[in-house]
Amino acid sequence: MNLQAILDDIVATLRPELGRSGKVADYIPALARVPADQFGIALRTADGQEVASGDSATPFSIQSVSKLFSLTLGVRALDEKLWERIGREPSGNPFNSLVQLEREQGVPRNPFINAGAIAVADRLLSVGDGLDDLLAFLRSLTGETITVDEEVAASEAATGFRNVALANFMKSFGKIDNDIPAVLDVYFRQCAIRMDCRQLARAAAFLCRDGVHPLQRTEVLGVRQARRINALMLTCGTYDAAGEFAFRIGLPCKSGVGGAIVAVVPDELTVCVWSPALDATGNSVLGMRALELFVARTGMSVF
Ligand code: GLU
């Protein structure tokens, strides 16, 4: 299969659509300034071939895609114990909703909604160095320098009132151990990590390799743990549109409001698409279209 031709064709097909539909996330002021007319795609096969097209080397704010990597660190450090504080069900509610958390006694439905990721950040601070561990992990997975966009982090910290509320709310139920400012600092800064499509496809590659590190023979996660992360991506990885993603794309995916979506084809490859304009559910409009085209052209699906 000529993967380069497939990616180039997807870029050519979608380029005329750039800037036509969707809206760049504007609830974080620093994200509102990102030009909408950008599109990149990159993949890495299980045996290490890397293919890219479009704006695949343009860095962006990875936002909620960071939750994939913080969860991986949490599972690595705590395994089953992580699930004492975090559920594994789709929320059926917006990613920043407070309502469910009240009914469910401060236990977030899953690690990919904001409350769940804040709870994971708390666990990472309890077992290690929080953000430093996450950055070191991403550097190891990519073999490249990965940094935080401090302007985006400051912008989130200045406007993330709902996340502050979620963290305090969980703390009131005794479900957060560390100081709230320290936990939120990890959370806001992990969302503000800058990476490009190429780096994200590479970093996530352990998920298509039964947990084996993309660049080394070492284990990032055990086989069962890696499969479970893929299961969570499929059921909870794309906000309140996970059903639609399973229906239209049929791959485990994790999206972020910066416009990135990482998808996994188990045993085959990982792919990252990025285009900043989002639909009403917070998923990249062209990212989703690109994944549909990719699946149609390659026949790859978990179903
Ligand atoms: N930093 C964003 C927030 O907390 C992350 C949102 C996202 O990508 O889902 O609202």
Image (tube, rainbow, N blue to C red):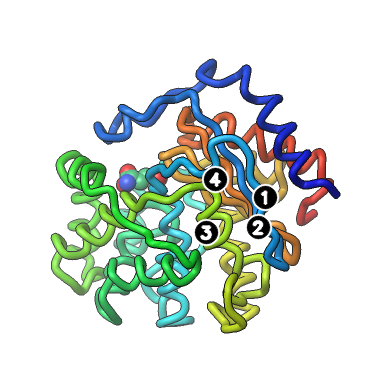
Kindly identify which residue carries mark 3: 89
Q: Of marks 4 and 2, which one's residue comes earlier in the chain? A: 2
Residue 63 versus residue 238: which sits nearer the camera? 63
Dot 1 corresponds to which residue? 51
Residue 95 showing in the rendered view:
no
Residue 185 can be seen, yes or no: yes
**Three-letter amino acid code of the residue under disc 4:** Ile
Mark 3 lies on a secondary structure that is: loop
Q: Earlier in the sequence, mark 2 or mark 3?
A: 2
Along the line of sight, the residue nearer the viewer: 152 or 102: 152
Q: Which residue is mark 2?
A: 44
| Camera-side mark, 3 or 1 | 1
Q: Are marks 3 and 1 in contact (CB under 8 Å)?
A: no
Q: Residues within 10 Å of mark 1 (few under 14, many from 20)?
A: many
- Asked which quadrant contains residue 173, the reply is bottom left
Question: Mark 2 near mark 1, Cβ–Cβ under 8 Å?
Answer: yes
* Mark in the foreground, 4 or 2: 2
Q: Is residue 134 toward the left or the right of residue 75 in the image?
A: left
Query: Is residue 242 depicted above or below 224 in this figure?
Result: above
Quarter holding ligand 1? top left
Q: Closer to the N terminus: mark 3 or mark 1?
A: 1
> Foreground mark, 4 or 3?
4
Vertical placement of residue 101 versus 240, above or below? below
Q: Using a 10 Å C-alpha cutoff, classify the residue at mark 3 as few (fewer than 14 neighbours), some (14 to 19) or many (20 or more).
A: few
Residue drawn where x is 65% and y is 25% of the image: 14
Residue 54: percent from left, percent from top: 59, 35
- Amino acid type, callout 2: Arg
Residue at the disc numbered 4? 261
Viewer-nearest residue: 197 or 70? 197
- Nearer the N terminus, badge 2 or badge 1? 2
Mark 4 vs mark 1, CA separation in Å: 16 Å
The amino acid type found where label 3 is placed reads Glu
